[in-house]
Image: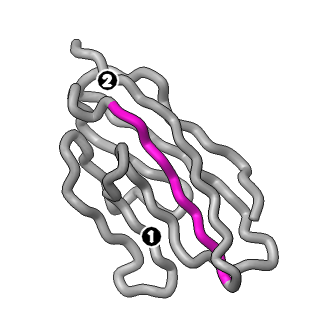
Amino acid sequence: MKLNKFQIPVYKQEGSDAVLICDFSTGQDTLYFVKWYKGRREFFRFVPQSTPQIRTFPELGVHVNEARSNETHMFLENLTIQSTGTYSCEVIVEPIHKSKVLTGTMTVGSK
């Protein structure tokens, strides 16, 4: 597995949107899942072998645009002060369940 690009906006304004990027190549492996966390709480899961592929979980300040989000790009809408925090992307591939976790911090300021 190879990381191509990881990007979390450092600063965003309240009411704006954000794109979080966790772009990777699996190489010879198969993608098992991608999970996004705010702090230690999971708020998004992409499982290619599942129907539906995307599941979201409630988290304060996190409003996912499911229609635009996928295994490499996370679209958050209408950011609030509560959106401030540490965001992590976890990628797991099979058959050996190799994983990578990448973390960045985003601060949301008031208008």
Q: Which residue is mark 1?
A: 46
Q: Do the residues under discs 1 and 2 have CB atoms within 8 angstroms? A: no
- Label 1 vs 2, first from the N-terminus: 1
Answer few, some or many: residues within 10 Å of disc 2's Cα (few below 14, many 20 plus, some between 14 and 19): many
- Identify the disc placed on residue 108: 2
Numbered disc 2: secondary structure: strand
Numbered disc 1: secondary structure: strand
User: What kind of secondary structure does the magenta stretch mostly adopt?
Assistant: strand
Task: Tell whether 49 sits left or right of 23.
Answer: left
- Identify the disc placed on residue 63: none
Determine the residue positioned at 35% across, 81% down.
52
Verify whether residue 46 appears in magenta: no
Determine the residue positioned at 41% across, 37% down.
86
The single residue placed furthest to the top in the displayed view is 111
Verify whether residue 91 appears in magenta: yes
Query: Which amino acid is tagged 1?
Result: Phe
Query: Which amino acid is tagged 2?
Result: Val
Task: Tell whether 38 sits left or right of 57.
Answer: right
Of residue 81 and residue 67, the one placed in the foreground of this image is 81
The x, y position of residue 83, in whole percent, is 27, 34
The residue segment tinted magenta is 85-94
The x, y position of residue 103, in whole percent, is 53, 42
Q: Please, is residue 111 above or below residue 16 in the view?
A: above
Of residue 98 and residue 78, the one placed in the foreground of this image is 98
Q: CA distance from mark 1 to mark 2?
A: 25 Å
Of residue 14 and residue 33, the one placed in the foreground of this image is 33
Task: Tell whether 96 sits left or right of 40.
Answer: right
